[in-house]
Image (cartoon, grey):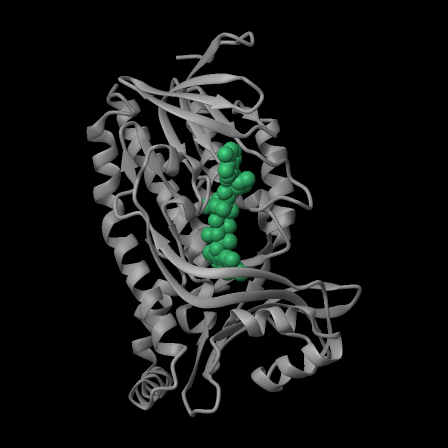
Amino acid sequence: MSASIQTETQVAEVDIAIVGGAMTGATLALGLARLAAKGRPLSIALIEAQAPGEAHPGFDARSIAIAQGSIFELRRLGLWPLLAELGTKISNIHISDRGHLGMTELNASQFHLDALGQVVELERVGRVLFDALRHSRVQLHCPAKLTGVAPEADGHLLTLDNQQRLRARLVVAADGIHSPVRQSLGQPLTQIDFGQTALVANIITDKPHESWAFERFTATGPLALLPMGDSQGQARLSLVWALEAGQAAMLKSAPKAEFLQALQQAFGYRAGRFVDVGSRHSYPLCLSYMPRPIFHRCVFIGNAAQTLHPIAGQGFNLGLRDLVCLLEVLEEALARGQDIGAAATLHSYLALRETDRRETITNIEFLVRGFSNQHWPLVAGRSLGLRLLSWFPPLKLPVARKAMGWR
Ligand SMILES: Cc1cc2nc3c(=O)[nH]c(=O)nc-3n(C[C@H](O)[C@H](O)[C@H](O)COP(=O)(O)OP(=O)(O)OC[C@H]3O[C@@H](n4cnc5c(N)ncnc54)[C@H](O)[C@@H]3O)c2cc1C
């Protein structure tokens, strides 16, 4: 089916409408465009409220770690060649528990890999993905905000804030934690508030990072430092520091010297001396997930389906597995001439995603609760766990498989 051009009062008919064009939605749209280019009859619309730029909520100042398994999937989608030059390799990860003996390391060489993952700056990724979208067969509605979703027997009627209307046989909601699609359709969301806020900033150090990433569990919460590309010859690390909300607010506005001193005290000198910090941003942290991320002719993916605490850097990695799985299910339905929005198609997707979603969500909750706690049996247990990983390297394989996001 091809898309029809509409006047203001007409309705454009599309096969798939994706709501939300940040990391998950934009990647899915490009994956679907690739399917369409292979000759599958498919018209695709992407509705995104914000054009790439400074105010974009999904392509903002954050840097994220993309696991090796996700790089593999992005390569299969033909996207990694576009993004590769933005990536900084993670070759080693150092994990430690502040004030206790537990520590361990993961090294790419132990697993015969070139890297455990890559760090990318979201703002730069957004520009590349949108450039690719503009040259693709995806109908881009951006900036355009979804204002209404009306379920119909064979699809949904979507209304945008520019008065345009689209009718889609399948709606994919990639519209984030507050998903307007989920709210319009009255679908439930389970939320666990950990009372933590992430403080995010770029840090200049006096020592090159040599592709090391660091995860340190502190009394207030976990602290991660990811390697970034140098800036004007200076070594940079991307900081994600989970703190109690009041402490995060205080450190966000603290004078630079005071902030750097507090960070140095919490982390130590393993990554060198922290000499400067860029602009600081904060994100309230919680764990939220839809118990059932499908509805009548609608699938929820990425942060709309589940938003994770960034403790293990798994949010986009899990969202990518959602969208890759959805692409596979849709390709198979199209090959068989089946209805892409039919309940059977959506149930196939749900069945394929269930275990990975459940396990990842449970592991993250366990990590956040276990490593943000000074209760002595937990402290002893996690110190022992980290030491066991150091002493018996084969135990690292299951941990590394999860960290690297292999399906
Ligand atoms: C501090 C921090 C560090 C992180 N680190 C990592 C990491 O190292 N590795 C990792 O894998 N993940 C990490 N994550 C998670 C990762 O950033 C997210 O999982 C990923 O970016 C989610 O993208 P998304 O596209 O699903 O959702 P979002 O980024 O929330 O995008 C939703 C999009 O929907 C659009 N939208 C909303 N409403 C409407 C509407 N009405 N109409 C049209 N459009 C609409 C928004 O404009 C937005 O662009 C981190 C997250 C945080 C907060």
Choose top left, top right, bottom left or bottom right for residue 254: bottom right
Residue appearing at x 26%, y 56% in the figure: 358
Q: Residue furthest right?
A: 232
The answer to whether residue 343 is left or right of residue 330 is left
Q: Position of residue 304 (x, y in %)?
A: 40, 44
Front residue of 378 and 86: 378
Estimate the x, y position of residue 234 in percent, counting from the top left.
76, 70
Across and down, in percent, residue 302 comes to 41, 46
| Near-viewer residue (29 or 171) | 171
Q: Residue 205: which quarter of the image?
A: bottom right
Residue toward you, 155 or 85: 155
Is 369 placed above or below 27 here? below
- Relative vertical location of residue 198 with respect to residue 2 in this rendering, above or below: below
Above or below, 281 relative to 292: below
Q: Can residue 113 be seen in this view?
A: no
Q: Which residue is drawn at 40% across and 69% down?
A: 111
| The quadrant where residue 238 appears | bottom right
The residue at 41%/61% (across/down) is 404
Left or right position of 245 against 236: left
Which residue lies at the image location 61% right of the left edge and 30% below the top edge? Answer: 143
Quadrant containing the N terminus in the rendered view? top left
